[in-house]
Amino acid sequence: MREVRHKLAPLNPEFYSVTFGAGGSTQDNTLAAVIDIQQDRATTGIDAAPHLSCVGSTEEGIRDLLNTFKENDIRRIVALRGDLPSGMRDPGDFRYANELIDFIRKETNDYFTIEVAAYPEVHPQAESAAIDLVNFKRKVDAGADSALTQYFYNIDSYFYFVDRCQRAGIEIPIIPGIMPINNFSQLARFSDGCGAEIPRWLRKRLEEFADDAESLQAFTLDFLTDFTEKLITAGVPGLHFYTMNRIDPTLTICQRLGLIK
Ligand SMILES: Cc1cc2nc3c(=O)[nH]c(=O)nc-3n(C[C@H](O)[C@H](O)[C@H](O)COP(=O)(O)OP(=O)(O)OC[C@H]3O[C@@H](n4cnc5c(N)ncnc54)[C@H](O)[C@@H]3O)c2cc1C
């Protein structure tokens, strides 16, 4: 983990976010990692941003966690609903992320900078794109400072979403999420579950490289470098890389784009 951070440091990110298993499954690991990141902040200047999924949690449990974050000088949270692990039925005290944000603001005022999730291609459980946008706005109205999007490979979906947000009066930065591609079948499975579309032309190209990891890597690095460059040229407010602890693709893309100090 430290080694990963050390290698990513030349990118000079504003924060490292650390994922969290809904239902608390990886809560202890998330906590240990973010405390470590925050303790290094004095030398790195880089914040820790724990993901906090509320589904299956009680108000008391979240309050305790917020206090632990404060005791460790953690000032950012990626506030999420999460998904109940299979076998768990009780949603607990929070049904949706906007309720978590409400709670965080009531308990801690403006202490935390709160990031939330956004879905340019629509959350898979949403009744419609319009209702999903209304629900996204609930999170903003509850006090979100900024949004990180689900990853996407159809760049227009992001621009269209940002445009709709602006027309709905949403003014917070919406930072595109970029997922480097390491393994096509894994990505296809994951994308089906989270509602991210792999455009047909891209899927077809990736299928061609099923047995040739080197060519897959070369193709996806070219594709994502070009993709990220288009986002930067369009003036996006930031970039959020889903490194999944595999940092080389992210480093290569950023190196090619001259983003490494
Ligand atoms: C940047 C990012 C990071 C993530 N990190 C993690 C992680 O660390 N751990 C993890 O388990 N998962 C993570 N996820 C996945 C996320 O937990 C799932 O996508 C989850 O299904 C939804 O979480 P949310 O916070 O977006 O939920 P919400 O914003 O609550 O939305 C969930 C669904 O409910 C609807 N909805 C929202 N509010 C209301 C309301 N008030 N009334 C009725 N309907 C409503 C929405 O339209 C949507 O369909 C991440 C996703 C993203 C984009």
Image: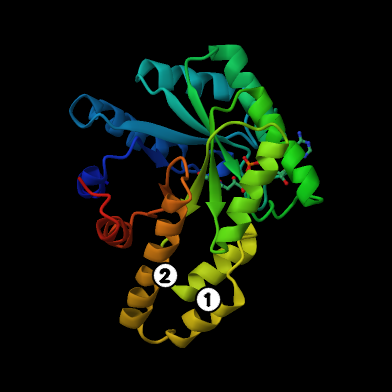
> What mark, if any, has residue 223 been given in the picture?
2
Estimate how packed mark 1 is, as few (under 14), some (14 to 19) or many (20 or more) residues with alpha carbons within 10 Å: few
Q: Residue at x 31, y 80 (%)?
A: 214
Q: Residue at x 56, y 51 (%)?
A: 150
**Residue 179, relative to residue 162: is it above or below?**
below
Q: Quadrant of ligand 1?
A: top right
Residue 58 seen: no
Residue 142 position, x and y percent, is 66, 23
User: Gap in Å between the C-alphas at discs 1 and 2?
Assistant: 9 Å
Residue 179 position, x and y percent, is 45, 58
Amino acid tagged 1: Leu
Of the 4 image quadrants, the one containing the C terminus is top left
Left or right for 253, reference 68: left
Q: Which quarter of the figure has residue 254?
A: bottom left
Amino acid tagged 2: Phe
> What mark, if any, has residue 256 been given in the picture?
none
Q: How is the image coloured?
A: rainbow
Ligand 1 within 8 Å of disc 2? The answer is: no
Which of these two is toward me, 175 or 93?
A: 175
Q: Residue at x 69, y 53 (%)?
A: 122
Residue 69 position, x and y percent, is 42, 22
Q: Which quarter of the figure has residue 31?
A: top left
**Residue 107, relative to residue 189: is it above or below?**
above
Residue 109 position, x and y percent, is 55, 12
Q: Residue at x 40, y 65 (%)?
A: 226
Q: Are marks 1 and 2 in contact (CB under 8 Å)?
A: yes
Q: Which residue is mark 1?
A: 202
